[in-house]
Amino acid sequence: MKDTFGTPQSLLVLGGTSEIGLATARRLIARGTRTVWLAGRPSAALDVAADGLRTLGTPGTDVRTVAFDALDPGAHEEVLGKVFAEGEIDMVLLAFGVLGDQAHDEAEPLAAVRVAQTNYTGAVSAGLVCAGALQAQGHGSLVVLSSVAGERARRADFIYGSSKAGLDVFAQGLGDALHGTGVQVMVVRPGFVRTKMTAGLAPAPLATTPDAVAVAIELGLRRRSETVWVPGALRVVMSALRHVPRPVLRRLPV
C-alpha cells in the first residue's frame, strides 16, 4: 500500500453515512489522508457527512460522494469502477450494513432477506469489485466491518449474526485469495457499538464507540493485521463462548 507511516493517501468508504466509517475517515484525514470518497445512497445525510469531513482537512483535501446502493449489485462494477478510474485508492472500508429487528424479521421473511442481501450479498458483490480493482493497481487494503455477532448463533440476533458470519468467512477467504498480490484484507470484529443504529438497545458488556473502532482500524493497518477485535478482550470472550454447549448457551443472557 502506498502510504505514509501506515496512512492511506486515498480512502473509499462504502456506507458513506456509517458512523464507524466517518470516525475512521476523520482519524485518517487528521493523519494525512487527502482524498476521501463517501459511497452511499444520495441523501441530505450523505452530503452533510461530506461537508463535515471537508471542514477537517487541509485546503488540499478532496472529499467526494458517489451514489452507491448495496441492494443494487448489478450496478456495483460500473459505479465503483468510475471511482477507481479517477485515481488509485489506497484503502477501501466496507462499512455498510443493517441491524434489522429480530422479532419483526422472524415474522416477516422478506425483511430478513433484506438484512441478508444488504449485509452479505451486497458486501460480496462490492467486496469482489473493489478487490479486483485493488489487485489491478497492485496495492491497497480492503477493511471489512464484521461483528462478534457472527461468531456464535444467538437467539437474540441470529438473522443479523448469520449475515455477519457469512461476510466474515467471505472476507477471510478473500484475504487468502489475495495473499501475495500486494492487497491486504483486514476483518474487523467489533462488539456492541454505541451508534444511532443501536440507540434504544441495552448496551452489551464491553460496549465500544465508533471512535474506538476507528483507532483499532488504524492500528490494525499499521500492524498489517488480518483480524482486529474491538475491544481486544472480546477475542478471549468469544473464544470461550464458542465452546459453550448449546443447551447452556440458550440459558445465558447473551
Image (cartoon, rainbow, N blue to C red):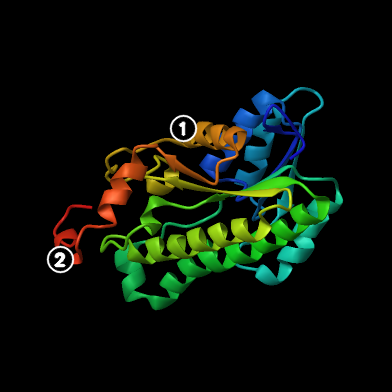
Comparing 179 with 135, the one in front is 179
Q: In this view, does 34 lie to the left or right of 244?
A: right
Name the residue tied to disc 2. Answer: 247
User: What amino acid type should be assigned to the residue bearing mark 1?
Assistant: Ala
Percent x, y for residue 20? 52, 41
> Which mark lies nearer to you, 1 or 2?
2
Q: Residue at x 82, y 51 (%)?
A: 137
Q: Is residue 102 visible?
A: yes
Mark 2: amino acid: Pro
Callout 2: helix, strand or loop? Answer: helix
Whole-angstrom CA distance, mark 1 to mark 2, is 34 Å
Disc 1 crowd rating (10 Å Cα; few below 14, some 14-19, many 20+) is: some
User: Can residue 201 be seen in the rendering of this structure?
Assistant: no
Outermost front residue: 180
For the residue labelled by badge 1, is the local secondary structure a helix, a strand or a loop? helix
- Relative depth, front residue between 230 and 119: 230
- From the top left corner, tell me how far across and down residue 108 is, in percent: 37, 75
In this picture, residue 27 sits left or right of residue 230? right
| Quarter of the figure with the N terminus | top right
Q: Residue furthest bottom?
A: 109
